[in-house]
Image: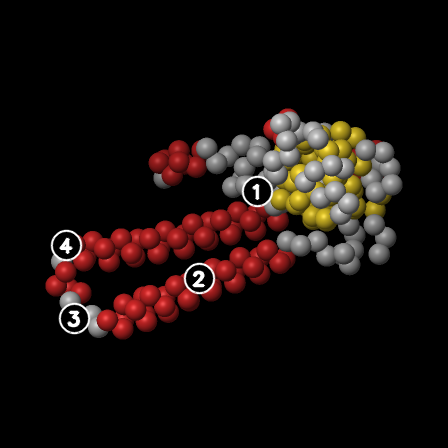
Amino acid sequence: MAGAGLLLAGCGGPLSTLDPAGPSAASIARIWWVMLAGAAVILAFVLVLLAVVFLSPDRLRGVPGRVWIVGLGLAFPLVTLTALVTYALLTGERLIADPAERDVVTVRAVARQWEWRFGPPDGPLTAGRLVIPAGRPVHVAVTSEDVIHSFWVPRLAGKMDAIPGHVNVIRIVAPAPGVYHGACAEFCGLGHAAMPFVVEAVDPAGLNAAGLTEARP
Ligand SMILES: [Cu+2]
């Protein structure tokens, strides 16, 4: 266990997908663990077969050819890959922001070389800091003023491209007040690494102070 802890120590930190703080990020981390477990089981199975072939080939001599070709060559990858891909697609589908969702807060995220600016839908933008209410779903309307960037707060959700002339919406939820670090996840020029930002989740009383407006269905 100590070895596993040491191995995963490098996966922590403020920009870690494997240290989720919100439900969307937790789903993504779960996909990662399921994929890792699935790949590990398949790799172990193949290595055992390989070892048997080298160390004790007589054991496999009686296995008919169709078992290798139809069973392990076609059926096995078809079943395992279909199961893993279906799981990943269904999980990913649930992460998409539903425009009809009620009780949601809407904010804007506007990228440009090389900074992120945030604010309410019709209000002024503030550089480098997005304030959201804790415990509430937030729809972040992401766009860009120049080239393609990508909005990414690893502990809250996946990535969303910021595309000039187009608005993409990503749903984030921060269950507890706190500061969550974000970064641009699409190379956008020489200053790409110099456009970090923070998402500050505040208790509901801080919502009005942040000047955020709530979507009315
Ligand atoms: Cu960038």
Q: Which residue in the protein does label 4 denote?
A: 55
Q: Which residue in the protein does label 3 denote?
A: 62
Q: Which residue in the protein does label 2 denote?
A: 81
Label located before the other in sequence (2 or 1): 1
Label located before the other in sequence (1 or 3): 1
Query: Residue 24 appears at what percent x and percent y?
Result: 62, 49
Q: Is residue 204 visible in the rendered structure shown here? A: no
Name which residue type carries label 2: Leu
Name which residue type carries label 4: Leu
Disc 2, disc 4: CB below 8 Å? no
Label located before the other in sequence (3 or 2): 3
Q: Secondary structure at mark 1?
A: loop
Mark 1 or mark 3, whichever is nearer to me: 3
Q: Secondary structure at mark 3?
A: loop
Left-right relation of 172 to 145: left
Q: Is residue 26 visible in the rendered structure shown here? A: yes
Mark 4 or mark 1, whichever is nearer to me: 4
Identify the mark at residue 20; answer none if there is no mark: 1
Left-right relation of 144 to 32: right
Q: Secondary structure at mark 4?
A: helix
Quick one: label 2, few (<14), some, or many (20+) residues within 10 Å?
few
Residue at figure coordinates x 15%, y 64% from the top left = 59
Label located before the other in sequence (2 or 4): 4
204 versus 51 height, above or below: above
